[in-house]
Amino acid sequence: MKTRVSIITFLLALVALLGNSDGASAKEWTINERQDQLMKDINTAQKKKALTDKEAKGLRKDLADVARKEAKLRGKNDKQIPIEDKAKLEGALNKVSVDIKRLALEKRVDVAKDKANAAEDKADAKEDAAKKRK
């Protein structure tokens, strides 16, 4: 019973702590801030060879498409973007973000597979050399 009370007290304290919204919540990004950050992410990933030049170029094109759509929407609506259109822009930015991560992770997996195959080939070569000596 005492343990149960301690657990409940702990959970209540945790909920109170997590529910506290005194600036500890996630930052609300504007569309332009997200575009800027995604461009930085693309540039960084390309420099680190996590993205090929072709992949980076394609992602930049996708971001440019979003920027064009945003500019068109802002022009139509006195610089205000309607909520439903903002959601579409956010969705397009989400896709670019996911693509950056996906492509970079694919490279990591490919590198790991290459290393594993190289180690396997080296072990096979040692085994073959040992058989030839016998």
Image (cartoon, helix red, strand yellow):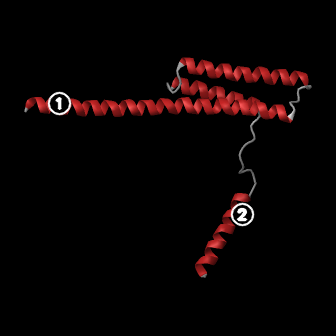
Question: Which residue position holds label 2?
Answer: 16
Few, some or many C-alpha atoms within 10 Å of disc 1 (few <14, some 14-19, many ≥20)?
few
Q: Hey, which quadrant is residue 1 in on the image? A: bottom right
Classify residue 116 as left or right of residue 75: left
In three-dimensional space, the C-alpha distance between marks 1 and 2, rounded to whole angstroms, equals 64 Å
**95 on left or right of 120:** right
Kind of residue sitting beneath label 1 = Asp
Q: Earlier in the sequence, mark 1 or mark 2?
A: 2
Amino acid found under the numbered disc labelled 2: Ala
Eye-nearest disc, 1 or 2: 1
Numbered disc 2: secondary structure: helix
Q: Residue at x 84, y 34 (%)?
A: 84
Above or below: residue 27 compared with residue 100 = below
Q: Nearer the viewer, residue 21 or 125?
A: 125
Q: Position of residue 49 (x, y in %)?
A: 49, 24
- Mark 1, residue position: 128
Q: Residue at (53%, 24%) from the top-left corner? A: 51
Nearer to me, 124 or 50? 124
Residue 129 horizontal/vertical position (percent): 15, 29
